[in-house]
Image: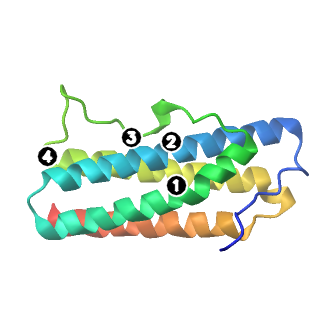
Amino acid sequence: MPAEPTLPLSDLSLPRRVAVAELLGEIVATERALAELYEGFAAGTSHLPLQAALKTLVREKRARLERLEPLARAAGAEGGADGLAPPQPTEDTPVERRADFFARAFQGERILEVRVRELAMLIGDAGVPAALAELAAENARHLGRLRELYLRYS
C-alpha cells in the first residue's frame, strides 16, 4: 500500500499553514461538488456515451477525494467554503440542459485549477511535492476531457 501523500507544512509560517488548510478545504469541497454534479447529470441523461464518460469522471473525482481528504485533514482544513463550488442544481433550478451542466462543470474545474495553482505558490518555498504536481496534471486532464465532451455532445 502506498504511503499517504504529505505536504511540507512544518517549514511554513503559521499564516501560510492556515491559508494552505483553507485552500485544501476549498479544493475538497469543489471536487466533491463536481463529483455530485457529474453523477447527477449522468443519471439524468439518456445519451449512453456521455453517461459513460461522466461516470468515469465521477470515479476519478472520488479517487482524488480519497487522496485529498487525508491531506486536508492533516493540514487542519474544515471542509471548505460552499460558495467556491459550482452552483448545485435544486428543485427550483435543476440542470436540465447540457449547456447549463457544462457551464457549471467548467466553472468548477476552473476554480480547481486556480486553487491548485495558489496552493503551489504558497508551498513553493518548501518545494512542491509530487502529489501536488500530480494534482495539477489531473486538473488539466479533467478540464481537457470536459472540453472534449462539450465539443462532442453540445
- Going from N to C along the chain, the mark reached first, 3 or 4, is 3
Which residue is labeled 1 in the image?
65
Q: Amino acid at mark 2?
A: Ala
The secondary element bearing badge 4 is classed as loop
Query: What's the distance in space between the residues labelled 4 and 2, CA to CA?
Result: 24 Å
Which residue is labeled 2 in the image?
29
- Going from N to C along the chain, the mark reached first, 1 or 4, is 1
The secondary element bearing badge 3 is classed as loop
Query: What's the distance in space between the residues labelled 1 and 4, CA to CA?
Result: 27 Å
How far across and how far down the image is residue 150, in percent?
24, 62
* Left or right side of 17 for 62: left
Query: What's the distance in space between the residues labelled 3 and 2, CA to CA?
Result: 10 Å
The residue depicted at 76 percent of the width and 49 percent of the height is 122
The secondary element bearing badge 2 is classed as helix
Q: 66 or 139: which is nearer to us?
A: 66
Q: Quadrant of residue 89?
A: top left
- Going from N to C along the chain, the mark reached first, 1 or 3, is 1
Are dots 3 and 2 in contact, CB under 8 Å? no
Which residue is labeled 3 in the image?
86
Q: Amino acid at mark 3?
A: Pro
- Going from N to C along the chain, the mark reached first, 2 or 1, is 2
The residue depicted at 82 percent of the width and 64 percent of the height is 127
The secondary element bearing badge 1 is classed as helix
Query: What's the distance in space between the residues labelled 3 and 4, CA to CA?
Result: 16 Å
Which residue is labeled 4 in the image?
97
Q: Amino acid at mark 4?
A: Arg
How far across and how far down the image is residue 105, in percent?
34, 50
Query: What's the distance in space between the residues labelled 2 and 1, CA to CA?
Result: 9 Å
Numbered tag placed on residue 76 in the rendering: none
